[in-house]
Amino acid sequence: MPRRLSDLVLIALVLAPVPAFAKDKIAPDAFSVSMPMPPAPPPANGSIFQGGYVPLTSGGRAGNIGDIITIQLVERTAATKSNAAGTQRDGSIGLTPPTTGPLSLFNPSDVAAGGGQQFKGKGDASQSNALSGEVSVTVAAVYPNGTMLVKGEKLLTLNRGDERVQISGIVRAIDISPDNRILSTRVANANIRYVGKGEIARASQQGWLQRFFAIISPF
């Protein structure tokens, strides 16, 4: 093996990240959900009914820190873009020399010129995404205007890898159905993440050494 090629391989081995098989499990990240604790119940005052005040119009809807809301994932996006352009330009000039005198030596074709220019361009792009399912989240904060910050995640450990769905955002109490469900399209500042680890996800990615040479390749 030439020395220069061996040096490149050595550098790749030193600088390359940890192989995917060494980090199959999903490590906790900055999104990690800290489970909020519900507020402490009020002290007993001798009354038979110790529940807090709940407006009759609210029913059993979530409205306090620690309450559970089920978010129905109905995300679907589609985008298409197409453009086309075409130009064409032609020009010509011709002179007829006199039949007498020194210029009569020139033929009409000797003093004629012409030119043309043409361009055609076209581009198309399309992309679509879809995500469906349900994730139950907890109320992490209640704001004075009635909106609530919700956070939650679902971790599935399968025999071929791990799947994690994370979601956070702000919801309005009026958008919550009586059975404490809300569409993901009603979540403001929604942060939805769907990630997976395992041999299935790893098989659809390039190897770490192949990615390294793809970065430094000038072609």
Image (cartoon, grey):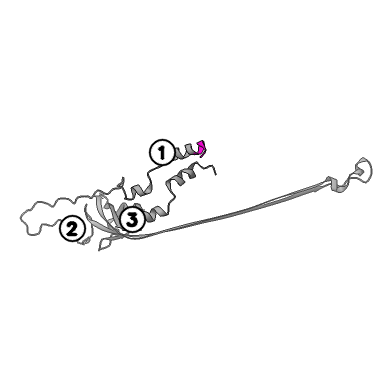
167 relative to 209 in the view: left or right: left
Residue 104 sits in quarter: top right
Q: Are marks 1 and 2 in contact (CB under 8 Å)?
A: no
Q: Which residues are magenta?
A: 1-5
Eyeballing the image, is 30 above or below 51?
above
Query: Which residue occupies the extreme right position in the image?
Result: 100
Q: Badge 3: how crowded within 10 Å, few (<14), some, or many (20+)?
A: some
Would you say 121 lies left or right of 153 here?
Answer: right
**Real-space Cα separation, disc 1 to disc 2, in angstroms:** 62 Å
Residue found at the far left of this picture: 46
Q: Is residue 14 visible?
A: yes
Residue pointed to by mark 1: 14
Question: Does label 1 or label 2 sit earlier along the sequence?
Answer: 1
| First of labels 3, 2 by sequence position | 2
Helix, strand or loop status at disc 2: loop
Coordinates of residue 87 in the picture (x, y in percent): 66, 52
Q: Horizontally, is 146 left or right of 78 in the view?
A: left
